[in-house]
Each structure stands twice: as C-alpha cells, then as structure tokens.
Amino acid sequence: MIDIGCHLSVSKGYLAMGKAMEDLGGSTFAFFTRNPRGSAAKAPDPEDVQALNDFCKVHHFGKLVAHAPYTMNLCSDKDRAREFAETCFSEDLKKMELFPGNYFNFHPGNALKQDRNACIDWIAEVMNRYITPEQSTVVLLETMAGKGTEIGRTFEEIAAILGRIDEDKREKTGVCLDTCHIWDGGYDIQSSLDEVLAEFDRTIGLDRLYAVHLNDSKNPCGAHKDRHEKLGEGEIGRDALCAVVQHPLLQGRPFILETPNEIEGYRKEISLVKSWEQ
C-alpha cells in the first residue's frame, strides 16, 4: 500500500500532525524542522514527540520526510549565511534523532556567483562534518528545477555531492525526487519516464532514492522555474503522475504532496493518489 501524505504545520504540535494526517487518509507527512523562511526553532516537547512516534507505529505510518528551511544555503557566498546554514543543519539533524529512522530533506543550495564545483565541495564538507554512521536519520538531497543558480539541477550534480560523502556515512544519505523540479529541470517524465529513471539509476542509483515529492507543474518541461501545480492541472498531467505512482521502480517510498492546496484539497489528492494504485 502506498504511503501518501502532504506538508503539515507543526504549530499545534507533533501528535496533532499525525492525527491530522490520519483524518486526511494518509500514512506519511512532511513538516519543516523550523520556520521555512526564517531562523526560529521551537524546542520540541519530549512527551509530544514520543506521542507522535507511538501514534505512527500504531497506525502503520511510513517514513516521515522532514524539510529543512528554504533559507538554509550551505554554499552561500556570505559567511554569516553559511554559518546560519551550518547551525540549522547540525541542530536539525540532532532534532531528527528524536524521530528515529525518518528522513531529513534539504535543498542543496545556491551557487550565486561562485564556482559550482566549489559549492558542491562545501555542501559535502558540511554533510560529512555532522552526519555520523551511528545516526538513524537518512539525509536527503532534493532534486532541483534549476531556477537561478540552484545546485542540484541535474542528476550529475546530486551524484557529485553524494560521491564526496565519506564512505562510512553514505548509507545515511540519499535523494528526494521532486516531480515538478525534475520536469522543470528538463527531464521529460511525461513521455520518457522509463528513460528518466534509467538515467537516474545510471547516474545516482535507484537504491539512493528514498522519497518522492509528487507535484504537477505550471511550466513546460525545461522551464527552470519551479512553480508547483495541483495534480492533473498542470503541464505534467494526471496520466504521467499516475504512471509515477504506479511505476514498479518507485514502490516502497513515501510520496509527499507539495501542491498549492488547502487541507480539503489535500484530502481529495490523497484519495486520488490512493485510487491510482488500485
């Protein structure tokens, strides 16, 4: 059975997110480890955390996919911004150990006017500094659309970062594939899904793919704009996204919706995605 869910707000607590997702009919969800566009990070209530962990176990939830703040740029050209990003990464990675065995996903960063290869080195350097072989959390690099100077706009750039991770830490790292992002990045999952997945496997390895962000796109393939759309209402289309959900090489991974919806819209999309696996 597919694990499908969406982003939820942590404002009412961790257990409240689990209950909200059960009500929506899903069995996984994503949440921001701190304010997505700022630096605020509320200390978790240990009882609330344990209550969510117990709830997910009892209700057979799949892996949760936490998301780092958008402002975290591990390769910023400003020292202060890089220090903030490193603090976010290290603190949030520790926080994720309160939720054993789940995923911590982040956007690799923006090169701005810097050398891209140097930026890839810096991202991997921070990952190596804080990831440990003993941790239970798997850190996921998200595939990006190529907007501006984003790092991770090609499978090759993601592979380059992962290839720089210390060998004893590699099993604690992987990829979150975003359907809108790779489409906007030029990977045609509408007419060439098998070929795109084969390229991913050659370049990165499908064994490194841990989660999927399931989104339609407002843009044509290769637009490099990163504008998400509701399922079936964008340029990727319902049939292509259904094929993603049903593809045998993508089974067993959590699917997270990041479509422009309110709660009831997510309820409908979760039901739609679950109907596709039948």
Image (spheres, rainbow, N blue to C red):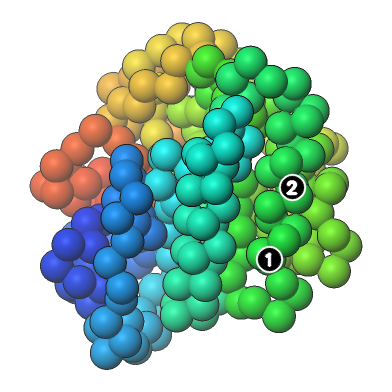
- Which corner quadrant of the image does residue 155 belong to? top right
Q: Which residue is mark 1?
A: 131
Height in image: 155 above or below 112? below
Residue 118, compared with residue 140, is above or below; it is: above
Q: Residue 19's image quarter? A: bottom left
Image quadrant containing the N terminus: bottom left
The three-letter amino acid code for the residue at tag 1 is: Ile
In-image side of 226 versus 167 (left or right): left
For the residues labelled 1 and 2, the Cα–Cα distance comes to: 10 Å
In this view, the residue farthest toward the right is 167
Would residue 52 be seen by someone viewing this image from the given angle?
Answer: no
Image x and y of residue 151, in percent: 63, 29
Precedes in sequence: disc 1 or disc 2: 2
Tell me what residue is drawn at x 32 percent, y 41 percent.
37
Name the residue that disc number 2 marks: 124
Q: Is residue 177 left or right of residue 99?
A: right
Residue 86 lies, in percent from the top left, at 57, 52
23 or 147, nearer to the observer: 147
SS at circle 1: loop
Name the one closer to the observer, 23 or 77: 77
Q: Where residue 232 appears, x then y in whole percent?
A: 32, 27
State whether residue 34 appears in this view: yes
Question: Considering the numbered disc 2 on the image, is that residue within a helix, a strand or a loop?
Answer: helix
Disc 2 marks a residue whose amino acid type is Ala
